[in-house]
Each structure stands twice: as structure tokens, then as C-alpha cells.
Image (cartoon, rainbow, N blue to C red):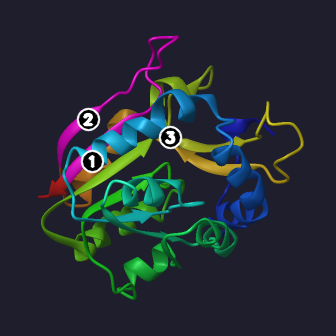
Amino acid sequence: MPDNDFPCADEAIVLQSWGKNAKAWTRAVRTNAIESRRLVTNQAILDAVVARQPRTVLDIGCGEGWLVRALAARGIRATGIDAVPALIDQAREAGGEFQVASYEDIIASRLELKADTLVCNFALLGEESVAPLLRSLPALLEENGRLIVQTVHPLMACGERAYADGWRLESWAGFGDAFPSPAPWYFRTLSSWIALFVSAGWQLCQVQEPLHPSTGKPASVIFTAQKA
């Protein structure tokens, strides 16, 4: 099945896949096996957050928790949440403040947390779930706070496929047999991302495009937004 034609109507498949891949993902992150993260995107999101001089950070979709620990090492109180229990287990084993919570928990106002900076680092992977999540996030944000989102750069992630919104399938090519489950994710064009923020009630303050040091091409895009 072509990667750009993956019919992921049930977004639960995304979570199921990440549950199966939790240990492999943790190993890949902690051994710096992913070049773009090692050379560009990890430092890029860390710099973007630290530049805000936050007191408190909520990492939404924290995965195995590296960003929470990196911020804590800089004296910033950070908490991570993720809907995948297996990833939260990995995060807690390495230390830090973590809890299992889904986008549905946030949308339904079941999460009793607030922070002056919210972060979604490569965590907005769905289609229909993302807009209601973005509309709900201001309830977690303290006054004059910011939302920082890093995601794949649409220009580079598009590859040879049509530049159009749609489901893609991460096959983990190049990672050997470590990842047992292909992972679906929803591709958005740059204009779709901007429209999504605006329609959800956010005002974009800054758009950054961190560049890969070898290719000179954007490795990701980082959006910083405030409540409109």
C-alpha cells in the first residue's frame, strides 16, 4: 500500500503502533540513532523552549521523556504526559514527572495541570484529533503563556508524493527489525498547519525552520503561538 494512501480512519491505530514500538523508540532516542534529532531537532526544540525563559513546562506527547529531563537539568519544572502507557513507563524509569493522559483527557478537561509553556514535539500525529486538542489547550496555559509545536517540515517530509494533506505510513526503513509496527501519521502542508492554528484560536508569534548542517535544508518547522 502506498505510504501516501494509508486509510487511517481510526486514530487508535496510531496509539497501538506506538505502544508496540515503545522500547525500540526509547532505544533509538537514547542512543542518538536518529540523525535529524541528533544534529538538529532535539537542540532546536530545547532552544525554542528555553528562549521563552519558562518557569513551568508541560510536554504533551512526551514519549520516553528526554525533553522533560533536559529542561529539569536547566532548573525548569517540566511535566510530561503521553497517551501510551508503555512510553510513560520508559520515561519514569529514567526519572522525572510523568503521567498517562490522552488528548481526549485534555479535550474533556480531565487534566488538572497548568504551565506557562506547552510543548508538542513531533506529537501531533493525528487528523481529526488535532483541531479539538488545539482548541482545548488554552485551559492548560497560564496567563501570557505560549504553545510551541515542532513537527516535520512539510517540504522535506513530502518527498516525491503529492503536496497534499493525507495519511502517511512510517515504515521505519533504515532501523532494521527493531521497530515491530509501522506507524501511521497525518501529513499537513504548511498552509494547512497555519490555518489549523488560526481556526483553533491561536495567533502565531514565530515560525522557525531549523536547518540540517549538511544539506542546508529544513529539518523541521517550529511554531510558537499565543492565545488570540
Return the residue nearer the eye: 159 or 166.
Answer: 159
Spatial CA span between label 3 and label 2 = 20 Å
**Amino acid marked by disc 3:** Asp
Quadrant of the image occupied by residue 134: bottom left
- Spot occupied by residue 126 in the image (x, y as percentages of width and height): 53, 57
Please name the residue that numbered disc 1 is placed on.
Answer: 50
Residues shaded magenta: 204-225
Spatial CA span between label 3 and label 1 = 31 Å
Please name the residue that numbered disc 3 is placed on.
Answer: 165
Left or right of 225? Residue 89 is right
Q: Quadrant of the N terminus?
A: top right
**Amino acid marked by disc 2:** Val
Residue 7 visible at all: no
- Indicate the secondary structure of the residue bearing disc 2: strand
- Spot occupied by residue 107 in the image (x, y as percentages of width and height): 38, 78
Other-residue count near label 3 (Cα within 10 Å), few / some / many at <14 / 14–19 / ≥20: some
User: Which is nearer the N-term, disc 3 or disc 1?
Assistant: 1
14 shown above or below 40: below
Please name the residue that numbered disc 2 is placed on.
Answer: 207
Return the residue nearer the eye: 187 or 207.
Answer: 207
Residue 187 visible at all: yes
Q: Residue at x 38, y 34 (%)?
A: 221
**Amino acid marked by disc 1:** Val
